């Protein structure tokens, strides 16, 4: 009998994170490390499975952005098939992605971050959650709940199942859009636009209160990476890679994602299962770069939709070069929600959108495929190799949280340096360390663990390796 | 007993000349049946539900899965309804606590033997095994999973075989032998190590007997045999052809 393979839940990306903060002899913060203790074996257990199973397999990596994983996956599969996906199918995939962004960004902003932002980082932890927000700012909380619901509705109408839809398939999508669903979705647009514009106004007013956080939340120069379309505008589903340096110079542009390995290296650190990707031309660890909402708005020339473009211009005027503080990810998320709603509206009006030719069929014609999309948290790479029969022989995935790994570590260090003084972890420090991690929004399970009180553990470690304090 | 024995026995059944008519009871209902009919067949004629997995109308019986077990009053033994014929005056019980319990256990054991990952399976939502779990109220698996390491045979141009989803019902073996007449499929090893194989355990794609008709794929109750290129939940099996082919085969023989 063959050997036993145990697929434990740890094979998925789960929300177990641990932070160590290391003090020097003088009791000052010397280093900080974010240990990701959960990412194990996913690439391994894909091996031997048919590539057509991948889009659904990878959806199990993450419960909050399964659609991004399946989109990256089907794009890799499209390449293995070697087909040209019908244009309607491309548009439908993009529409589905709009639903995902609306829903995922809403969760991040309203459910996970708004308690910190609206109630204050130092407010009572027992009340620092969406229910607390509901009490203090009922209109905004209700808006948030509604907006998330709208995103979920859209996904449901496309893909039937909210959490793990199997509607996107290699070669296209497996069912066209119905006229009914189009009407239903169009009807939601005005309400969604109102909500997001109200929220943006409230958020921009509150920015004043967060000067200290803005100054210290991973506010340092790094490179940025994101997908842009042929005009250099924001693109979540297709597009080519663009890299920007900390001063705002575009250092690499219109890079075919298939060449990602020429630009991105992956370093492995002992303390974490998460690899640390870096921008290859600069080397490791100098090649630190960031992805995600703020990075995307940094690298692009604009959003390409009228309302979001106005907001984008305002966002980019925050700083002279690229926006450096990761705190602004919250802001960028709201702008991207607006962009997604506008894109949704535009695509739904497209006369071609009800076309029933939505899938190209083929046998595997190539033995490798690379699919790249922008997930809510940042650029997501899926790279597959298959044998002649179409069975997986190798897979590599770079998830958004991975892309940000180096920056997250440095962000935690920056906050720790500012808020930790001596061998004690104060509440103020703990709250802000958690919040800086949350600004990167590593993934829902992570974020919720951070949100809960004790679950995301932070250890303060002396120069001799002794644990001085824990939270 | 080899598969071939089972088939020849079945053939002789249907060739019986003068048949007696029996009367007995199923779940307290009086039923009448030809003496060569199985309890399962009689139950179905009377709209009495007995779960089955290896049985498929149009193929010979195999009695492999044991999900169709029923009680006969006065006998301590449970008997598989698909391969047991009725007898004059017996009282058959198709659904007692005891039977339900055993059926669930059998089903759970089937689940533990291979890697049935419904959520990523091509047959998700169209799977007889999955449907049985629902019908029989299986909520948990109380046994340890074996997690065998099994390879997929995707060497055939149009079809693939995933042992992870195979329940060894042997419908593929029977349809290939009895209807298509190719006998490409067979079984190797025994017990828990049994595997369906093509020809002499060589890659399906290199089989010299396979006609590529795809009947095995259509009769397979799970995602073990599927058409290539199907994504998750897209594999819907078509079995409409079976009654016709069965009919033709019957005509042939007379
Ligand atoms: S159906 Fe009777 S034993 Fe399988």
Image (cartoon, rainbow, N blue to C red):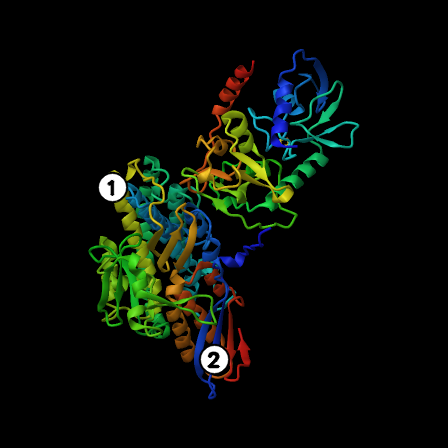
* Residue A16, image x, y percentages: 50, 64
User: How much space separates mark 1 and mark 2, taking CA atoms?
Assistant: 56 Å
* Residue A346, image x, y percentages: 25, 46
Foreground residue among A21 and A99: A21
- Quarter of the image where one finds residue A293: bottom left
A41 in relation to A30, above or below: above
Foreground residue among A92 and B124: B124
A402 in relation to A386, above or below: below
Disc 1 with disc 2 on a shared chain: yes
* Residue B195, image x, y percentages: 57, 41
Q: Quadrant of ligand 1?
A: top right
Quarter occupied by the C terminus of chain B: top right
Q: Judge the density around disc 1: few (<14), some (14-19), many (≥20) Cα neighbours within 10 Å.
A: few
The earlier-in-sequence mark between 1 and 2 is 2
Residue shown at 57% from the left, 49% from the top: B148
Name of the residue lying farthest toward the left: A231
Q: Nearer the viewer, mark 1 or mark 2?
A: 2
Whether residue A311 sits left or right of residue A99 in the image: it is left
Residue to which mark 1 is pinned: A350
Do the residues under discs 1 and 2 have CB atoms within 8 angstroms?
no
Chain of residue at mark 1: A
Q: Which mark is residue A334?
A: none
Residue to which mark 2 is pinned: A22
Residue shown at 50% from the left, 32% from the top: B216
Q: Judge the density around disc 2: few (<14), some (14-19), many (≥20) Cα neighbours within 10 Å.
A: many
């Amino acid at each position: 009998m063959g050997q036993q393979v145990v697929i434990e839940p740890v094979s998925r990306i789960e929300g177990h994170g641990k932070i160590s903060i290391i003090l020097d002899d003088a009791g000052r913060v010397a280093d900080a490390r974010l240990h990701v203790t959960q990412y194990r074996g996913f690439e391994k257990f894909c091996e031997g499975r048919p590539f057509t199973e991948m889009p659904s397999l990878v959806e199990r990596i993450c419960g909050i952005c399964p659609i991004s994983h399946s989109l990256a996956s089907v794009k890799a599969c499209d390449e293995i098939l070697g087909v040209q996906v019908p244009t309607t199918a491309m548009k439908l995939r993009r529409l589905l992605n709009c639903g995902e962004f609306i829903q995922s960004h809403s969760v991040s902003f309203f459910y996970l971050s708004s308690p910190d932002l609206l109630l204050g980082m130092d407010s009572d932890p027992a009340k620092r959650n969406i229910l607390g927000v509901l009490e203090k700012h009922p209109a905004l909380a209700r808006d948030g709940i509604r907006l998330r619901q709208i995103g979920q509705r859209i996904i449901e109408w496309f893909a039937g199942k909210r959490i793990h839809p199997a509607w996107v398939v290699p070669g296209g999508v497996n069912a066209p859009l119905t006229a009914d669903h189009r009407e239903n979705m169009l009807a939601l647009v005005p309400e969604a636009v109102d909500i997001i514009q109200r929220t943006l106004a409230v958020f921009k007013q509150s920015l004043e209160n967060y000067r200290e956080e803005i100054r210290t939340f991973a506010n340092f120069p790094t490179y940025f990476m994101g997908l842009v379309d042929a005009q250099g505008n924001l693109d979540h589903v297709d597009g080519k890679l663009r890299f920007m340096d900390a001063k705002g110079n575009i250092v690499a542009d219109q890079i075919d994602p298939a060449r990602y390995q020429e630009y991105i290296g992956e370093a492995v650190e002992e303390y974490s299962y998460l690899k640390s990707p870096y921008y290859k031309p600069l080397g490791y660890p100098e090649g630190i770069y960031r992805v995600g909402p703020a990075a995307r708005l940094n690298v692009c020339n604009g959003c390409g939709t009228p309302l979001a473009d106005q907001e984008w211009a305002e966002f980019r005027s925050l700083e002279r070069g690229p926006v450096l503080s990761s705190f602004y990810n919250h802001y960028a998320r709201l702008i991207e929600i607006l962009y997604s709603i506008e894109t949704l509206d535009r695509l739904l009006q497209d006369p071609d959108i009800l076309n029933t030719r939505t899938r190209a069929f083929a046998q595997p014609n190539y033995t490798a495929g690379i699919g790249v999309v922008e997930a809510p948290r940042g650029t997501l790479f899926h790279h597959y190799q298959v044998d002649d029969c179409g069975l997986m022989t190798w897979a590599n995935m770079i998830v958004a949280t991975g892309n940000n790994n180096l920056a997250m570590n440095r962000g935690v260090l920056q906050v720790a340096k500012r808020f930790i003084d001596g061998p004690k972890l104060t509440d103020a420090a703990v709250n802000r360390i958690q919040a800086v991690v949350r600004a990167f929004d590593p993934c829902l399970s992570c974020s919720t663990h951070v949100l809960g009180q004790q679950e995301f553990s932070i250890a303060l470690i002396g120069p001799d390796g002794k644990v001085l304090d824990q939270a | 007993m080899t598969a071939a024995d089972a088939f020849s026995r079945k053939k002789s059944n249907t060739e019986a000349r003068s048949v007696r008519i029996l009367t007995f009871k199923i779940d307290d209902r009086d039923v009448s049946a030809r003496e060569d009919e199985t309890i399962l067949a009689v139950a179905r004629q009377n709209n009495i539900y007995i779960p089955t997995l290896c049985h498929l109308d149009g193929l010979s019986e195999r009695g492999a899965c044991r999900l169709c077990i029923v009680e006969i009053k006065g006998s301590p033994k449970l008997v598989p309804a698909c391969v047991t014929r009725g007898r004059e005056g017996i009282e058959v019980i198709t659904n007692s606590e005891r039977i339900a319990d055993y059926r669930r256990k059998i089903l759970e054991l089937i689940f533990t033997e291979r890697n049935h990952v419904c959520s990523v399976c091509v047959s998700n939502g169209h799977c007889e095994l999955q449907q049985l779990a629902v019908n029989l109220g299986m909520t948990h698996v109380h046994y340890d999973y074996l997690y065998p390491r099994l390879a997929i045979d995707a060497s055939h141009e149009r079809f693939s075989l995933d042992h992870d989803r195979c329940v060894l019902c042997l419908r593929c073996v029977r349809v290939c032998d009895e209807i298509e007449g190719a006998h490409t499929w067979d079984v190797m090893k025994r017990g828990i190590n049994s595997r369906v194989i093509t020809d002499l355990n060589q890659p399906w794609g290199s089989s010299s007997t396979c006609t590529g008709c795809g009947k095995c794929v259509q009769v397979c109750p799970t995602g073990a045999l599927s058409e290539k290129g199907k994504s998750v939940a897209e594999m819907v099996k078509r079995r409409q052809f079976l009654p016709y082919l069965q009919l033709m085969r019957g005509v042939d023989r007379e």
